[in-house]
Amino acid sequence: MKNPYESELKALKRAGRYRERHIRDDTLMDAASNDYLGLAHNKELHLRACETLSLYSDHAPKASMLVNGYHPIHAAFESALCEANGFEAGIVMGSGFNANIGLIEALVRKGDVLLMDEEYHASGVAGARMCEGSVQFFPHNDSIALKELLKQAHGKRTIIAVEGIYSMGGDLVPREIIELAIEHESILILDEAHSSGVIGESLMGILDHYEIVPTPLMIKMGTLGKAYGSFGAYVLSSTHISEYLLNRAKNVIYATAPSLYDTALAHHALDYIQTHTQRLRDQIKRRKTIVRETLGIESAGLIIPIEIGDNREVMRLQEWLKNEMGIHVGAIRQPTVKKAILRLIARLDIDEVLLRQACERLTQIWVK
Ligand SMILES: Cc1ncc(COP(=O)(O)O)c(C=O)c1O
């Protein structure tokens, strides 16, 4: 039978944008995944999660949270997250992608204005397309442009959506953007997929980093599939916003509650981060120093973007790095980024000597 999407696939191949998945090769040094702290390899955490699960008669969520799927494991993790991050209420959700769609679709109602950073994650952009309010994208991290838009925004509510650390550029949201949201009494959505567990005195993310106390209009979305070495997401907010989300967010109401194993695992990861904060912070700092000394890149977190520009060239370099150096780094092409990049993740699992060697070799192929 004829492939109904043949022309689309051909066009992707012509543009060097065709994607394929490959089963990962564990013999390579993993400098591609978002497992920033290496917790996805920590067997102790896995065993603790299994022990926690074995305390209960059930091991699956079975239903939506609003029906009969809300489990003590979910509730305990939500309380721990609130305590650690200084928020009143929390809801665990299926994944970051799902949380962004659910959140934005529910929060931005008719008559509201959503102001979203142009580099916000694809899941937020999808949520923005689904919402009933008016949506405007502002230039990346541009607080002056945002200020102008805020002056002109006369919606019922104004909602600003930004990331703590941007997933591809690896840069931080500037403090002024958070301050503008506070000053204008706007609702602020902070996607902390890449900042939670990586920055801040307590490794709790962007508010912790800037030492800003959460206000009742702030919403923190964090993912569990990155620094927490698990799978899923959470949304922290005021009790009012949480109450509203439980009543309006379709990803919460119409979906089976998050996996109990993943939630228990993430809870043990949170405990681990809280008990080993200083050691983890030192390890993060040392990796950032290696990257600065070798590649000359000053990174906010552990995402190191190396601009290559050409879609095909970035794929060729990725293969070369695998074959010649045994390193797997991400190759990110358009339309995910404007110009193709090698995305190196300086994970804590990577030995420091190896990381330095890898960065030094990279300088030989990277023409800045
Ligand atoms: C900034 C950002 N938000 C949300 C997500 C989606 O999170 P998840 O992978 O848990 O679905 C990602 C994932 O890559 C991300 O980078």
Image (cartoon, rainbow, N blue to C red):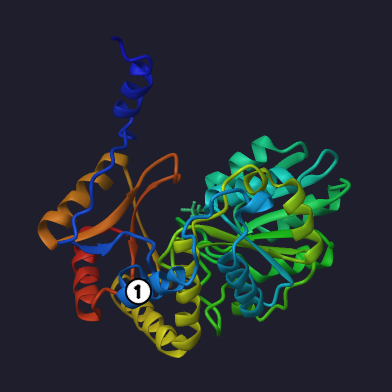
Q: Residues within 10 Å of mark 1 (few under 14, many from 20)?
A: few
Residue 73 is situated, as x and y percent measured from the top left of the image, at 55, 68
| Residue kind at label 1, given as amino acid type | Leu
Q: Is residue 178 above or below residue 144?
A: below
Please say whether residue 116 is visible from this viewpoint. no
Front-lying residue, 184 or 196: 196
Q: Is residue 11 left or right of residue 278?
A: left
Q: Is residue 160 left or right of residue 364?
A: right
Front-lying residue, 244 or 58: 58
Query: Residue at image x 36%, y 76%?
Result: 292
Which quadrant of the figure contains the N terminus? top left
Residue 349 is situated, as x and y percent measured from the top left of the image, at 29, 74
Residue 200 is situated, as x and y percent measured from the top left of the image, at 55, 80
Q: Is residue 4 left or right of residue 162?
A: left
Residue 80 is situated, as x and y percent measured from the top left of the image, at 60, 76
Query: Residue at image x 45%, y 90%?
Result: 278
Q: Is residue 22 above or below residue 80?
A: above
Q: Which residue is mark 1?
A: 47
